[in-house]
Amino acid sequence: MDTLLQQIELYKQEIESIKPNGPESLESYRIKFLGTKGIVKNLFAELKNVPADKKREFGQILNEFKQLAESKYESWKEATSQASITSHEKTVDLSLPGDALPLGSHHPITLVRNEIVSIFGRLGFSVAEGPEIEDDWHNFTALNLPEDHPARDMQDTFYIHQNPDWLLRTHTSSVQARVMESQKPPIRIICPGRVYRNETISARAHCFFHQTEGLYVDENVSFADLKQTLYFFVQEMFGKDVKVRFRPSYFPFTEPSAEMDINCRICGGSGCNVCKHTGWVEILGSGMVHPKMLENFKIDPNKYTGFAFGMGIERICQLKYRINDLRLYSQNDLRFLDQFISAV
Ligand code: PHE
């Protein structure tokens, strides 16, 4: 018993004298004193050899020793983990600015669409949207294009297999119809969106592209308003020096109708293959809303008049950024897309 007490005393001194250093010596300390075959366990095993009358006293001494060994371990462990944080912090400069993330860019179609929205926004036009899968009524019939109307052939349509009444909209004029159906004049909206036509894909045609429709219905809206609005638009989009001309045209939903050309932004009018050597490029179709269309939506054509226009966003893009192949827009080629980073 006395030798045991002496041993405990020596162990105590050893524990007190230990200077904590590093996680490895901490672990060997744990194994030596607190492990399953460690000193504390072994001393407790000696308890059975101690005479019965001393057991209580010896047990108490053992418990105190165990607590000492454990508390040494805990405080050492804490000091070690703090030390490792501090040494990590020394290698990381938290005040350094982070690495810049590579920025993506807006697609040129998005850039031009946003610009169109912003220009017409300044004239009080708000944005309206509609579904890309349309029914026949909104895409054709309501727009004064009954089933047997020859002008339906102007746009090769994709029909939806399951339901012959459904189709992929061929123009954003379908949104005009939806807006007139649900709103009363004054109406002043533009409708940017994707449209689909059954065309063979080439540099000059694609099976889907983008349009922006515009519609203004109110009392006393005249053709002069249409011209001035569209003139303002191209001046903002292409610069003050832009020239415009209107040519009579035909659309079933407008009367009279006109197409608008601007002087070619690529060659400046001297002639190139974009303007087919005419110096002029057609950019949109337009006209005064057909009275029959107003009637279709219970808007009184004696009280209200309106104008509408529709333009291809790709065409504006082509003239602005000199993009000469429609396929580039949907090929996701980063060599093409990355060129628009600075334009964001
Ligand atoms: N929807 C016509 C087209 O896709 C364009 C247009 C819109 C013409 C509105 C007149 C008025 O070609």
Image: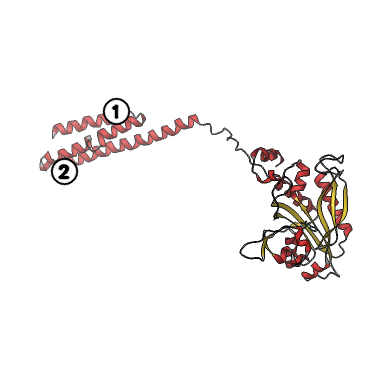
How crowded is the residue under tag 1: few (<14 C-alpha within 10 Å), some, or many (20+)?
Answer: few
Mark 1: which secondary structure?
Answer: helix
Callout count: 2
Instruction: Specify whether residue 183 is in view.
Output: no
The residue lying at 37 percent from left, 36 percent from top is 78
Tell me residue 135's x, y (percent): 68, 65
Q: Earlier in the sequence, mark 2 or mark 1?
A: 1
How crowded is the residue under tag 2: few (<14 C-alpha within 10 Å), some, or many (20+)?
Answer: few
**Colour option used:** secondary structure
Q: Considering depth in this image, is 84 or 47 the residue closer to the camera?
A: 84
Residue corresponding to mark 2:
56
29 vs 223: above or below: above
Residue corresponding to mark 1:
17
Left or right of 139 in this view: 42? left
Mark 2: which secondary structure?
Answer: helix
Tell me residue 295's x, y (percent): 80, 70
Residue 126 picture quarter: bottom right
| Quarter of the N terminus within the rendering | top left
Ligand 1, what quadrant?
Answer: bottom right
Left or right of 76 in this view: 267? right
The residue lying at 75 percent from left, 50 percent from top is 313
Q: Considering depth in this image, is 43 or 184 the residue closer to the camera?
A: 184
Residue 161 picture quarter: bottom right
